[in-house]
Image (cartoon, rainbow, N blue to C red):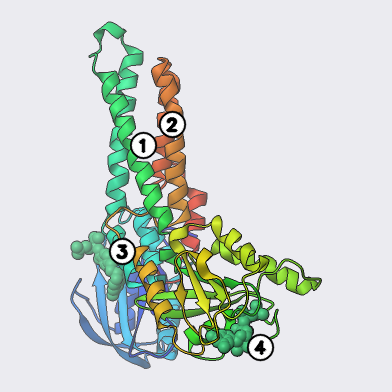
Amino acid sequence: MYQDDTIVAIATASGIGSISIVRVSGAKALEISLKISQKSTITPRVATLSYLYDKDKSIIDEAIILYFKAPNSFTGEDIVEFQIHGGVAIASLILDSVLEYGARMATAGEFSKRAFLNNKIDLSKAEAISKIIEARSSDAVKLLARQLKGELKDFVEEIREDLLFMLAYTEVSIDYAEEDLPTDIFLKIEEKIGKIEQKLENTLDASRRREGMIDGFKVAIIGKPNVGKSSLLNKLLNYDRAIISDIAGTTRDTIEESVKIGTHIIKIVDTAGIRENTSDIIEQIGIEKSINAINEADIIVALFDNSRIKDSEDDKILELLASQDSKNIIKVLNKTDLPKIFENELLGDFIELSTKESINLLIKRIEKVLDENSGTDELTLVSKRQISSVENTLNSIKMAKSPLYSGELEFFAHHITEALHEISNITRPYENDEMLDVMFGEFCLGK
Ligand SMILES: Nc1nc2c(c(=O)[nH]1)N(C=O)[C@@H](CNc1ccc(C(=O)N[C@@H](CCC(=O)O)C(=O)O)cc1)CN2
Ligand SMILES: Nc1nc2c(ncn2[C@@H]2O[C@H](COP(=O)(O)OP(=O)(O)OP(=O)(O)O)[C@@H](O)[C@H]2O)c(=O)[nH]1
Ligand SMILES: [Mg+2]
């Protein structure tokens, strides 16, 4: 995989659309484009209308050519974009011609990787680019766009500066006799450490609360058998996705579907009714999956049956809920069209409805919880990788404290250096080859 190869990919989604883009990056991009357009020059950054031809001089398409001259391009290399008529056939013909003239297919994420290697973007921006394309809500897009603009990079830069400051002063302290040092340095370092800890902890807190938002929230519908979970799923989806019957244990496997609520595209999960005593092995496996679904969900909709007496199976559900974040639990008393038998006094806050009638109250409540977990002014980390870098940074900083107090400055400096490396992983890691391959490999082709 050579960095000086010229690479090409179709940048747009495959399928039928009005326009597609084929993007070429590398030293030969201009030369290849001149051949394909049969032009003698192409002016950088000017939309140039031109016919495109294959090697046999047959015309392929009428296109707009955009040339970005190195280093002023997305990758930092020469880039030529062919904006052609949509559909798969034309794009493949252009692609084939570019390949014939000496380019090779880009690997997944290679454009972004080159942009990174040429210092055009840092890893937090590369990650934001890859995530923004898959974002499932307008809030997620807005949050990721802030990272395109460099919010996380600036945050990392501030922390790096503080850590470098500490290292510089400890180096001085180690090298020179104590009496020559200004006395307030220790206090300054102590203060900076406290501030960094606070910042990192706040960020982790805000980010964990918003983890589901970037990849799409998961809402799990749970409850004992026969309370109407699948009826609720079907009602939310507006079609008969799941089998409904009055036999307890109808749903045996979890069912996952996407649905739009407000500005959010969420995954809704219908689960097998949870009960304690079943001799059916398959049902038992389904129940285990239901419990997993609870743990993975961002929001839990727990159903109870108004028409039946509250029993130990309902208690089991309440017990399972007790270990979850109460802010994201919505309790629903279903079947209110039937006479009330359930003692709802112990439920606390709940919504009453009948899936035979309207579920609008519930939809509104789900939307409210989604909104509460979405918009934010706080800095938010958007991937497990970023979260674990910040966790590791925080750990190293905590470990640096005791040697600071006991005057073992070499140990202090060691932990601060570790912290510096960890935080840098978010934007520009020190040793990085393997990690970069993994990271950029996850990107879609053409990015
Ligand atoms: N046609 C097209 N649209 C696109 C992209 C693209 O590559 N091509 N992008 C791809 O992600 C995004 C826009 N991002 C871009 C980021 C930097 C540069 C660029 O040429 N940067 C140069 C010049 C900067 C300037 O003129 O201010 C540079 O950084 O030196 C281009 C696109 C979304 N839209
Ligand atoms: N009267 C009335 N019946 C309902 C309501 N919601 C669901 N039912 C009925 O309750 C029975 C069970 O519904 P399901 O949706 O299959 O229940 P479930 O919770 O998915 O059950 P399992 O998959 O077995 O755990 C069916 O006969 C439904 O028609 C309601 O609001 N009112
Ligand atoms: Mg069901």
Q: Residue 233: which disc? A: none
Q: Secondary structure at mark 4?
A: loop
Question: In the rendered image, which quarter is residue 195 located in?
Answer: top left
Does label 3 or label 2 sit earlier along the sequence?
3
The residue that mark 4 highlights is: 245
Contact flag, marks 1 and 2 (Cβ < 8 Å):
yes
Q: Secondary structure at mark 2?
A: helix
Q: Residue 375: which disc? A: 3
Q: CA distance from mark 3 to mark 1?
A: 24 Å
Does label 3 or label 4 sit earlier along the sequence?
4
Quarter of the C terminus within the rendering: bottom left
Q: Does residue 131 appear in this view?
A: yes
Q: Is residue 360 left or right of residue 192?
A: right
Q: Secondary structure at mark 1?
A: helix
The residue type indicated by label 3 comes to Gly
Contact flag, marks 3 and 1 (Cβ < 8 Å):
no
The residue that mark 2 highlights is: 398
Q: From the Cβ of disc 4, is ligand 2 less than 8 Å away?
A: yes
Q: Is residue 110 above or below residue 239?
A: above
Q: Residue at x 29, y 46 (%)?
A: 155
Q: Is residue 367 above or below residue 381?
A: below
Q: Return the residue found at the far bottom.
A: 58
